[in-house]
Image (tube, rainbow, N blue to C red):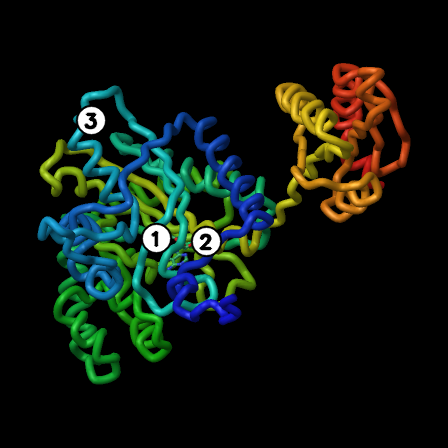
Amino acid sequence: MNTEQPKKELSAIKGTKDILPQEARLWQIAEAAAKEIFELYGYRELRAPVIEPTELFEKGTGASSDIVTKEMYTFTDKGGRSVTLRPEYTPSVVRAIIEHRLDLQPQPLRFYYIGPMFRYDKPQKGRYRQFHQIDIEVFGEKDPAVDAEIVEMAHRLLRQLGVENVTTMVNSVGCKKCRPAYGAELRKAAAAVKDRLCPDCQRKAELNPLRIFDCKIETCREVASNFPKITDFLCAECQEHFQEFLGYLDFYGIPYRVDPTLVRGLDYYTKTAFEIVAEHLGAQNAICGGGRYDDMVREFGGPDLCGIGFAMGLERLLSVAKIEPPKKSFVYFAYLGEEAKKQSIATARYLRSEGIECLVEFKDRGMKAHFSRANKIGADWVLIIGEDELAKGKFQLKDMIDSKQYEGTAEELAKIILLKDKKGIKSREE
Ligand code: AMP
């Protein structure tokens, strides 16, 4: 017999983790809430592949972004193509729109998706290499009312999942018309303090100074806080869009903070950028981030279709959510002998068709062992089938919470279980 411990390399890859059943229950609830809410706003699910051609992200996410320069899971497949495990979802949706000519459908187009993303960053609390995002995108709606609507939708989801104490940070990052003048000023300002910046930001100072705002190093953040503010450089159109966006947030009663250093880590944003941060999450405190990307579809060779969206991190969301999973009752079958086993299988089949969860275990147990097993796994009901019950065609049902016992046919017992469950499992627990 091999008694060796399993080798260490048989563990999940660093920065990835298993979601075990108890935790998965919470994920299911959060995902179901997201889907339900998004559908209420007219969003429909669009599922894209996990792997995409590398150039999709180089072009979409941006060649100078941290994600593309440092964090992509890129490899060459057997056909010699460079493929990447998606680090974010927006470029995939844009590709799908162009590939399937979804732009020919009536607009605006509203999509959502929930799934894994991959970034090769240093893992820490709240930052993983495989993480999960709830993502929504709207295409073909220029009105700033939609910018506020998606923020309100994110808040609705957070509220439903019991997330409290969040702050919404908003900014406008301008557009192709106003950003170049700002970029020039920023480049000048960055060049003047270059020796105080980290080597990475020194490189960014020339390449794309806006990205200096992404740096997590305290001295760089301090230096960047004195840089010129984008909000002082917005063109009339961007200024008007921003003011209207803020007006709609006021209309919804959503408190926000304007943060002119909020540029988000991706290159494609235009006009609106926002982030929802949670207290008590430490360094990785952003639960949700989003913004407008009015040029992206066109830059991919598609039609002139503006876009806006957000991504919410499920791991971070769940770490601050207060979810009480509803207790589901289930029936354990205590049977004696082969005939009773078959009767249990048939009865469980019927009860399941009535929507009742059943557990039939195929282990030869005496009645005492059955009950101790039922107790151990927290069964709410035990359905007893022995010789007497077989002969009568009526079974015993024991309520494990209040110890009451009932006798009846499968149909009669199903009614008892359903009625009691309907009255609320909570009162059963009291
Ligand atoms: P981003 O696409 O970087 O704007 O991220 C959107 C949201 O995804 C963030 O606000 C986080 O909640 C989540 N997120 C991003 N990167 C990670 C990561 N490496 N691990 C866990 N969650 C992440």
- Marks 1 and 2 sit apart, C-alpha to C-alpha, by 17 Å
Q: State the residue in front, 347 or 274.
A: 347
Q: Is residue 359 left or right of residue 366?
A: left
Quarter location, residue 143: top left
Q: Earlier in the sequence, mark 1 or mark 2?
A: 1
The foreground one among 275 and 174 is: 275
Q: Give the answer, above or below, for where 156 lies relative to 41.
A: below
Apparent side of residue 205 relative to residue 291 in the rendered image (left or right): left
Label 3 packing within 10 angstroms: few (<14), some (14-19), many (20+): some
- For the point 21% across and 84% down, which residue is it? 195
Kind of residue at disc 3? Asp
How far apart in space, not on screen, are marks 2 and 3 (Cα)? Answer: 30 Å
Is the residue 164 above or below the residue 394 in the image? below
Q: Residue 246: x percent and y percent?
A: 40, 44
Residue on which the image places disc 3? 103
Q: Circle 2 is placed at which residue position?
A: 287
Frontmost residue, 408 versus 1: 1
Distance in Å between CA atoms under marks 1 and 3: 28 Å
Q: Is residue 117 left or right of residue 329?
A: left
Q: Are marks 2 and 3 in contact (CB under 8 Å)?
A: no
Count how many numbered circles sit on residues in the image: 3
How many residues crowd around disc 1 within 10 Å: few (fewer than 14), some, or many (20 or more)? many
- Where's residue 180, x and y in %? 13, 57
Which residue is disc 1 drawn over? 171
Asked if disc 3 is less than 8 Å from ligand 1, the answer is no
Q: Nearer the viewer, mark 1 or mark 3?
A: 3
Residue kind at label 2, given as amino acid type: Ile
One can see residue 371 in this view: yes
